[in-house]
Amino acid sequence: MTTASAQIGAHPTESLAKARAKYAAAALERYPLTQGVNPWLVTVSVMLPTFMEVLDTAIASVALPYIAGSLSASNSEATWVLTSYLVANAVILPASNWFARRFGRKRFLLTCVIIFTIASFFCGAAPSLGIILLARIMQGAGGGALQPLSQSILLESFPVQKRSMAMAAYGLGIVVAPVLGPTLGGWLTDTFSWRYAFYINIPVGLLAVFMITRFVHDPPYIKNAKVGPFDNIGFGLLIVWSGCLQIVLDKGQEDDWFGAVWVRWAVAALIVSLIGWLWHSWTHPRGLVDLHILKNRNFGTGCFLIALLGMCIYITIAILPLYYQEVLGYTAFTAGLVVGPRGIGSFIGSPIIGFLGSHIDNRKLLSIGFLGFGVCALIFGTVNLDIGPTTLLIPILITGFALSFVFVPLATLSTSTLTREQMGNATGLFNMLRNIGGSIGIAMASTALIRRAAFHQANIGANVTASGYVLQQKSAALAGYLGHHLGPSAARPGSLGMIYGLLEQQAVLKAYVDVFRWTALLAFFCAGAVWLFKKPIKHEPLPPGVH
């Protein structure tokens, strides 16, 4: 009786186990690349940390004047909050492939998300500029691997015919986050404090940890990978040259560049360590970065263009909100709201490019995207002191749309001829160059704003003489107005002070116009360089290792 009962009781359990096994087998057959998990669940899981990491950079950009004021720093020093993060990020990017193979991609991704989340708390709680820079370096180190890991997981989760759709989803995080960040950052800064621009990463990070644990799995070749010893020499040289580059970019302007002895020594160390890193990475059989992948024409062209794209994107991300705040006097939230429509353009463009990417030559789409971005940058170069919040609405919207047409085809073309085993090394190098380009772009834009403002101020001042009729007339009118409020003795100096303030404002405006126009020229150059890509072959066989 007991035996019969046991057999009867075991039957439902056995049937349930068979049903689960059958369901798992069906899921594995339907989604073999993701081990039975729907690839769109994997997409959401890996896009959360990527979105969080890119969003953080954009949020910090709009809060820079508030960070500077709160921590007793200048605006130039506050930009170190952006550049220190980008360099720490770039240093980790090439090493991400080794760490992923050594410790497992899933485990490494989880570790990076946890480090990034903890560092975000310390960024928000930082009492001084030095502490926040240390926390940003820690945050950059944690966030460095998030993008290449997410990109390689996405590319391997979809068959090659659907990679455009995968990269469109990835582009939503990379392109939309920087354009939504200023709006969210401005609201948090004005409503609460700039510190909440970093605290917001904490709940997103916790959700990302949960989803990655649940839905992301390592592929067999990662689990069974034989990993050699860590390339200490290559990693050390990378730290030296990237650190020297960042120090020179951040501090060179303050000390008149090569007029300072320490700058010359830093540049010498940069050149020596960079050449040493390139030689070591090229000749070392198990180097941290395999530079031989650059011999792939499409990937080499993509690396060149992604560095230039990083310059274009981060220049606009950094200086457009500053223009509205520093020149026009907008609040952080208003400035973020004004540039926010770029996010709408990216939302519209990403699904369109995901569809068109499979039907139209990606080089054409990429060229259209760069041209659209360049035209919008030229329109930004027509700004004046009389523009309103909606004056640049259409070009800002088109900028976001154009960026979605740039990033997705660029990533697709760059990786289209690579094998799955090359993806980890390729995405690390690809994203490193984008960050290096962005860091150089921010430094160049900051230097150009300072120097061009001084140039235009001297040029305008040379045409405004103390005995000039226009100056005398304006000064007298202002003195008459100020005399009623400040008294006759302070009216004349006060009127000249106001006129000098207007002169300075016009000089700064012209400096921003110059930077916008130079960015447009860079985008137009990229539109032509797109045709260095090898023409895609329709229905070409899959590369080895791609299924």
Image (cartoon, rainbow, N blue to C red):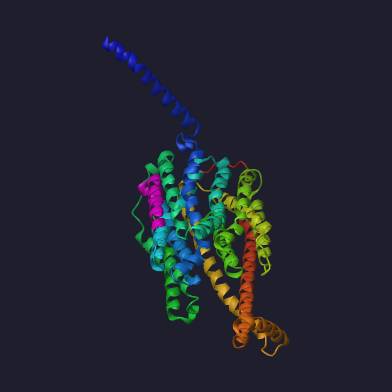
Q: Residue at x 54, y 70 (%)?
A: 446
Q: Is residue 373 magenta?
A: no
The extreme right residue here reads 469
Along the viewing direction, whichever of 444 and 446 lies nearer the viewer: 446
Along the viewing direction, whichever of 512 and 38 lies nearer the viewer: 512
Residue 492: % across, % down: 63, 86
Residue 453: % across, % down: 60, 76
User: Which corner quadrant holds the N terminus?
Assistant: top left
Secondary structure character of the magenta stretch overall: helix
Q: Specify the segment rendered in magenta.
A: 99-121
Residue 250: % across, % down: 47, 71
In the depicted structure, whether residue 228 falls above or below residue 387: above
Residue 88: % across, % down: 43, 61
The extreme top residue here reads 1
Asked whether the viewer can see residue 117, the reply is: yes
Quarter of the image holding residue 342? Answer: bottom right
Q: How many marks?
A: 0
In the depicted structure, whether residue 261 falls above or below residue 404: below
Asked whether the viewer can see residue 545, the reply is: no
